Image (cartoon, grey):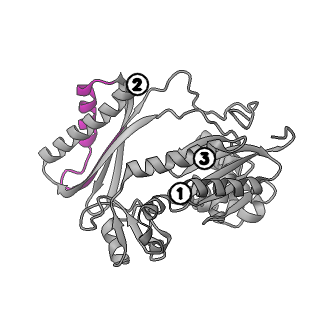
Amino acid sequence: MDDAARAWVLHVDLDQFIAAVEVLRRPELAGRPVIVGGRGDPTERAVVSTASYEARRFGVDSGMPLRLAARKVPDAIILPVDAPAYDAASTEVMAVLRSMDGAVVEVLGWDEAFVGVRTDDPEAYARRLQAAVLDATGLHCSVGIGDNKIRAKIATGFGKPRGMFRLTTENWAEVMGERPTRDLWGVGAKVSARLARLGITTVRELAQADRDALLAEFGPRMGAWYGDLGYGRGSAVVDDTPGVARGHSRETTYQRDLTRPEEVDAAIRSLAADVLADIEREGRPAIRMTLKIRYKPFFTRTFSRTLPDPTSDAETILTEAFALIAKREPDRPIRLLGLRLEMTMPDDVPDDVSADPQRSPLRGPI
């Protein structure tokens, strides 16, 4: 690779990944509305994991109750989640990305990754990458090209499906300026609503916002981060170091609402045992616990607490879990419970890999 070539960040996002894997296994489903979720039974309580583009045209999206999705698309093919198949397909894709000349690959999940590379022609590199993934796996991907992770990630949305788009400091204001803040990576409905209360509704307004007002609303760390986000500023570090899990979580949607105290207690015991087994395999104690409760019909609350001391003791974990579930609304039926334990981090894993501005924008073999 030419030493004078510029460093770029590419965000690679597999198009309708889970549905695409299912279509590869069942070619007769190509072009038909495919919905994947739960055990593939819309009469059960489950949510949509993904939907093909054909199903999305009817308003089906990830997280939607499977029963509602089936009503929206009566002739849809509804399939059960097959996590091992998706994991295997993802592993194959990431291997292809790592085989690309000069690539540094930071895996974000099953269906997406950042690729750091030095090249004089990022579009040509992206085309070669897309062709390599398609040839090896039969899967299509979109590529966002940026001068940092924020811009690369946002750029991908403009390239979908099967395309690419470049978003850099040069065209940021032109492309993003008049778009709503909700279009920014990391800004959801709640944050955009809080920004709107400050009179900030567009990306340009966020960039021009009074920094003190942002700090007062969101605190010193997040307020500064949102201010930078208005300009598309962010880390350009692509780190191929294997990720270290901060925590593990389990959740269960119950086919029949939990209404009796003994049912809730049994559910908490089961979740605590499962999550504790997960962190014991990590060999790191828990330091914080979060409980998610979804009431009937679909109202969700979360409760968190920092544990008195780092622990992997089953009795202590269970006691803390019972303390959180005691905060529930006792007369309200429960349809879902989730429990998360956050763990201590290894000493050699920094909290923010992008904190050092002197670091190279690419880590790994170039």
Q: Which residue is mark 3?
A: 96
Q: Which residue is mark 2?
A: 284
- Residue 237 visible from this viewpoint: yes
Q: Which residue is mark 1?
A: 188
* Gap in angstroms between the C-alphas marked 3 and 1: 32 Å
Q: Which mark is residue 200?
A: none
Q: Is residue 266 magenta?
A: no
Mark 3 and mark 1 lie on one chain; the one further toward the N terminus is 3
In this rendering, the label closer to the viewer, 3 or 2? 3
Q: Quadrant of the N terminus?
A: top right
Q: Is residue 58 left or right of residue 334?
A: right
Above or below: residue 361 compared with residue 333: above
**Badge 3: few (under 14), some or many (20 or more) residues near its Cα, within 10 Å?**
some
Q: Amino acid at mark 2?
A: Arg
Q: Amino acid at mark 1?
A: Gly
Tell me which segment is drawn in magenta.
312-340
Task: Measuring from the top left, give residue 243's x and y in whole percent.
Answer: 53, 35
Q: Are marks 3 and 1 in contact (CB under 8 Å)?
A: no
| Residue name at image x 56 percent, y 26 percent | 349
Mark 3 and mark 2 lie on one chain; the one further toward the N terminus is 3
